[in-house]
Image (cartoon, rainbow, N blue to C red):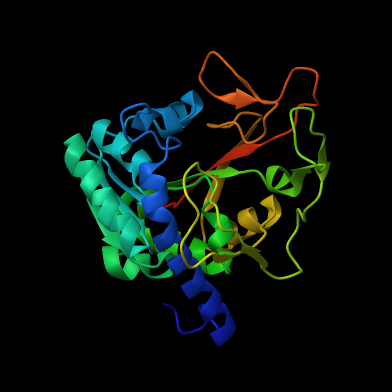
């Protein structure tokens, strides 16, 4: 882990690692991830993601903060030389088992994301993919962006598909229910430090966590993300916002023909997910 983080931040990062180790067996057994065959690796991608990524055959792709590797498998099946990286040893072990059962040819590495280039090599990848609940666990975005830039070859691309800061700021008016009203209940912008969450259950179905229930999350607005990437020498080439999610975050959401979930037509259309493209120029 990077030495420049102070002792308190390192403590929080270790707590997050322990929390994800504890979450992993719950997630493996959950219906949410559908590892019994009810969900396929491609189910986690919106159609526009493949349009943006283009042909991956023969490309070197690294999936940062990959957890169980459900998306990483999809890259391998598109012909990429795929690598998944995660700080949770339990997640990496289970991801290897899942990939082996699926007959997927790829590699998983245990490492903190801030050490990724040192572990995987500088300038070794055509595509860095990450997101969907990744950035909130990173206390320092400029250092993350610098690590991404180190991983990419000249001409290589970052593709970040992440939950929109507005999505993270919305919450239901209690008590939650079918008719729940969404209100701004959390910060959109950073500035008040990390949020401590102590939850015995995760976002999936399944039993309570037996230990390590505390995790810490950092808020990052879109401006902070873009500034970090530009500061690392990357050129932002596209930003897409969408009102769709790969699972129903709120009970009132409706599933579309594409299999993704949106708020009802009677609700205001707001961004819930964004996709950002950036390139490392020669």
Q: Nearer the viewer, residue 93 or 206?
A: 206
Q: Is residue 105 left or right of residue 53?
A: left
At 28% across and 68% down in the image, what residue appears? 119
* Image height of 226 relative to 36, above or below: below
Residue 115 drawn at (x, y percent): 38, 70
Q: Nearer the viewer, residue 97 or 75?
A: 97
| Residue 55 in sight from this viewpoint | yes
Q: Nearer the viewer, residue 13 or 199?
A: 199
Residue 263 drawn at (x, y percent): 70, 25
* Image height of 208 relative to 238, above or below: below
At 35% across and 48% down in the image, what residue appears? 68
Q: Quadrant of residue 93?
A: bottom left
Q: Residue furthest top?
A: 257
Count how many numbered circles sit on residues in the image. Answer: 0
Q: Is residue 163 left or right of residue 166?
A: left
At 69% across and 42% down in the image, what residue appears? 167
Residue 258 drawn at (x, y percent): 51, 17
At 51% across and 20% down in the image, what residue appears? 259
Image quadrant holding the N terminus, namely bottom left
| Residue 65 in sight from this viewpoint | no
Residue 233 drawn at (x, y percent): 52, 60
* Image height of 110 relative to 52, above or below: below
């Amino acid at each position: 882990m990077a030495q420049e983080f102070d002792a308190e931040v390192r403590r929080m990062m270790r707590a997050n690692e322990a929390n994800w180790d504890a979450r992993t067996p719950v997630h493996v057994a959950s219906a949410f991830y559908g590892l019994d065959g009810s969900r396929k690796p491609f189910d986690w991608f919106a159609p526009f993601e493949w349009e943006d990524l283009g042909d991956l055959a023969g490309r070197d792709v690294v999936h940062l903060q990959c957890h169980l590797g459900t998306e990483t498998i999809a890259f391998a099946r598109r012909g990429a030389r795929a690598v998944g990286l995660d700080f949770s040893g339990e997640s990496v072990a289970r991801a290897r088992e899942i990939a082996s059962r699926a007959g997927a040819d790829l590699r998983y590495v245990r490492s903190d994301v801030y050490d990724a280039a040192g572990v995987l090599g500088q300038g070794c990848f055509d595509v860095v993919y990450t997101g969907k609940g990744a950035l909130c666990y990173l206390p320092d975005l400029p250092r993350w962006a610098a690590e991404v830039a180190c991983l990419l070859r000249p001409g290589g691309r970052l593709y970040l598909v992440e939950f929109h800061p507005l999505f993270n700021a919305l919450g239901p008016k209690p008590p939650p229910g079918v008719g729940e009203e969404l209100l701004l209940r959390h910060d959109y912008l950073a500035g008040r430090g990390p949020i401590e969450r102590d939850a015995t259950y995760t976002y999936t179905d399944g039993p309570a966590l037996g230990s390590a229930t505390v995790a810490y999350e950092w808020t990052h607005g879109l401006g902070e993300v873009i500034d970090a990437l530009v500061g690392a020498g990357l050129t932002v080439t596209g930003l897409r916002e969408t009102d769709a999610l790969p699972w129903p975050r709120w009970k009132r959401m409706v599933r579309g023909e594409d299999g993704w979930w949106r708020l009802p037509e009677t609700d205001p259309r707001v961004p819930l997910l964004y996709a950002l493209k950036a390139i490392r120029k020669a």
